Every structure is written in C-alpha cells, then in structure tokens.
C-alpha cells in the first residue's frame, strides 16, 4: 500500500508502484550495486621488439634483469614487484577517483577489466642464460581485473518530483553502509551520499 506523508509532501512507493513509475524521465534507472570483492592480476608483460610487442615469456622469465649495468634478479620477480607496488596502487586510486566514468552501468561492473599500461625503463636489459642481452626498456603491462558485486535493495520515493532512493548494505566487516541518491528530472542532476557505521564492538 502507498503511504503518503502530508507534512513533508513525500510520496512513498511500493515495489510494484516503483516498477510502474515512469523512471525514464530520471537520469538513471533505480539500481544500486556494491563491489564486494575485486582482483587484479598481471597477465603478461610485453617488450618492444622492432616495431611490434612480444611477450617476455619468449626470453624466459627466469632470465636476469640488468638495469644500468647491474643485475637485479629475475625478470619475473622484478616486474611482479613493480605491478604490486606501483601499478596496482595506481589502478586502485584511479578507480576510486573515476569510478563513475569507468563503471556507468551494472553491466560494466560485471565485465572483466582489461588494462594496458606503457612504461619506459632506459638502460634495462634481459640477460639470457647464453649471456646475450636483449633491450627491454620499452614495456607494455597487460592487466586483467574481475570483481564480485551485490545488488542493494532500495526504497524509492518522490518529493517535489525528485526521485529519492535509499538503501543499506551490511559489509563483511560488520559495518553498515547507508546510501542516499536524489535525482532531478528537470536539471538531470544526480546527488549521491553514503556513510559507513562501524559495529559498536569494533
């Protein structure tokens, strides 16, 4: 049953009425998804060989990396370290600051992420077991990312033709995240806010 609060002029909709409402006039359709898990992995590292890129695997990942004349361990260990300590933090920061550009729909969240990251390390060579040194100063890192998501049940209401959507999500650490989204069909503006409440015994 629809509930009406005359004091605040708020019209609260049931799920059935929310489905029947003409949501097309609002910038986005009601829907809220949280990312519950995420994983990025280094799929491959390519080095520039002539005018094309070739996988470092053809050189044997156990080959020694030489930087400015000094041996620095294996290719595998060095580039896994670079991925974990430099590329991964950069990806996480970029995702947080540009999440609305990267993930515009629920379908985007469920897609596998493909990232190419180009880097130049002057004076870097791979020293093979034969003693031959191969220039690997121009590299392309290939990264794949996957995530798990959970849809948050929402309540929808209208206030002066604004659509107000609210929802709650209980996180894995026991904290509760509350979401509020307001949409204006006239200006096409969307305002969102969320806050996390930690459990009292935390």
Image (cartoon, rainbow, N blue to C red):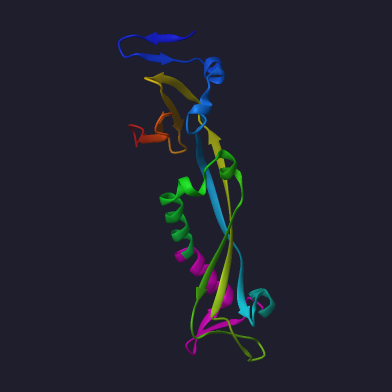
Percent position of residue 117, x then y: 53, 66
- Name the residue nearer the viewer: 7 or 87: 7
Q: Does the rendering let one see residue 175?
A: no
At horizontal 42% and vertical 34% (from top left) the residue drawn is 188
At horizontal 60% and vertical 41% (from top left) the residue drawn is 107
- Going by the picture, which residue comes out furthest to the front? 186
Q: How many marks?
A: 0
In the rendered image, the vertical position of residue 147 relative to residue 190, given as above or below: below
Is residue 95 in the magenta section?
A: no
Res. 135 image quadrant: bottom right
At horizontal 69% and vertical 77% (from top left) the residue drawn is 58
Placement of the C terminus among the 4 image quadrants:
top left
- Name the residue nearer the viewer: 134 or 19: 19
In the rendered image, the vertical position of residue 129 relative to residue 110, given as above or below: below
In the picture provided, is 110 more to the left or to the right than 98?
A: right
- Going by the picture, which residue comes out furthest to the left? 7
Percent position of residue 139, x then y: 56, 74
Percent position of residue 152, x then y: 50, 30
In the picture provided, is 27 more to the left or to the right than 44?
A: left
The range drawn in magenta is 60-86
At horizontal 46% and vertical 22% (from top left) the residue drawn is 155
Q: Does the rendering let one see residue 93?
A: yes
In the picture provided, is 202 more to the left or to the right than 73?
A: left
Res. 19 image quadrant: top right
Is residue 70 in the magenta section?
A: yes
In the rendered image, the vertical position of residue 156 relative to residue 194, given as above or below: above
């Amino acid at each position: 049953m629809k509930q009406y609060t005359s004091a605040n002029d708020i019209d609260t909709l049931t799920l059935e009425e929310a489905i029947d409402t003409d949501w097309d006039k609002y910038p986005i359709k009601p829907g809220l998804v949280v990312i519950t898990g995420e994983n990025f992995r280094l799929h491959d590292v390519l080095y520039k060989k002539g005018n094309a890129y070739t996988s470092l695997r053809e050189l044997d990942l156990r080959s020694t990396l030489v930087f400015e004349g000094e041996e620095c361990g294996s290719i595998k260990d060095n580039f896994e370290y670079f991925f974990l300590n430099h590329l991964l933090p950069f990806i996480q920061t970029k995702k947080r600051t540009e999440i609305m550009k990267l993930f515009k729909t629920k379908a985007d969240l469920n897609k596998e992420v493909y990232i190419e990251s180009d880097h130049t390390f002057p004076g870097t060579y791979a020293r093979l077991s034969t003693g031959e040194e191969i220039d690997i100063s121009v590299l392309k890192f290939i990264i794949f990312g996957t995530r798990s998501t959970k849809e948050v049940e929402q309540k929808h209401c209208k206030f002066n033709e604004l659509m107000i959507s609210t929802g709650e999500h209980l996180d894995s650490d026991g904290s509760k995240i509350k979401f509020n989204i307001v949409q204006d069909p006239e200006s096409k503006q969307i305002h969102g806010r969320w806050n996390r409440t930690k459990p009292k015994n935390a």
